[in-house]
Amino acid sequence: MATDVPIYDFSMIAGDSKTLAIIVYDCDGNIQPITGASIKFSMMKTNMPNIRFDKEIGNGLSIIDGGGGLFHVLFGVGEVTIVGAYRHQSQVILSGDSQTTLKGMVFARPSLTPNE
């Protein structure tokens, strides 16, 4: 059964840290347990495929509550420094099934405060 992938757009200040809290749902809208899953989160600068960020468990991505379908994606201070638009997507692989769980746009905006 084909389902629409939820779209989540967000903004961040270029150079700042950012933690995304993502809950995975099944096609019926129920929370999908992710205990034992392999998860990938990718973000790529629009029109610049050489500027990309790939996160996986142990490398900027952590399962916080497997039974509750919750994982975090962490961008560290100074990691995303180029202002502009990016596309993102997350994928969960569990028991041999692969599910794109989220996609959307990221807008890295310039800071309005001076750097110290």
Image: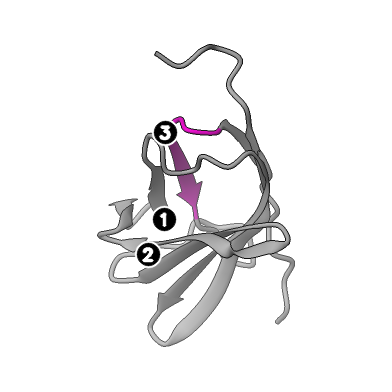
Q: Which quadrant is the N terminus positioned in? A: bottom right
Q: Main secondary structure of the magenta part?
A: strand
How far apart are the alpha carbons under marks 3 and 1? 23 Å
Near mark 1 (Cα within 10 A), the count class, few <14, some 14-19 or many ≥20, is many
Which circle's residue, 3 or 1, is located before the other in the chain?
A: 3
Say whether marks 1 and 2 touch (CB < 8 Å).
yes
How far apart are the alpha carbons under marks 1 and 2? 5 Å
Q: Residue at image x 34%, y 71%?
A: 37
Tell me the quarter of the picture where residue 113 sits.
Answer: top right
Tell me the quarter of the picture where residue 50 sits.
Answer: bottom right
Residue at mark 3: 17
Q: Is residue 70 visible?
A: yes
Range shown magenta:
14-23
Q: Residue 62 location, x and y as percent?
A: 31, 53
Q: Residue at image x 65%, y 58%?
A: 103
Residue at mark 1: 69
Residue at mark 2: 34
Q: Is residue 65 visible?
A: no
Numbered disc in front, either 3 or 1: 3
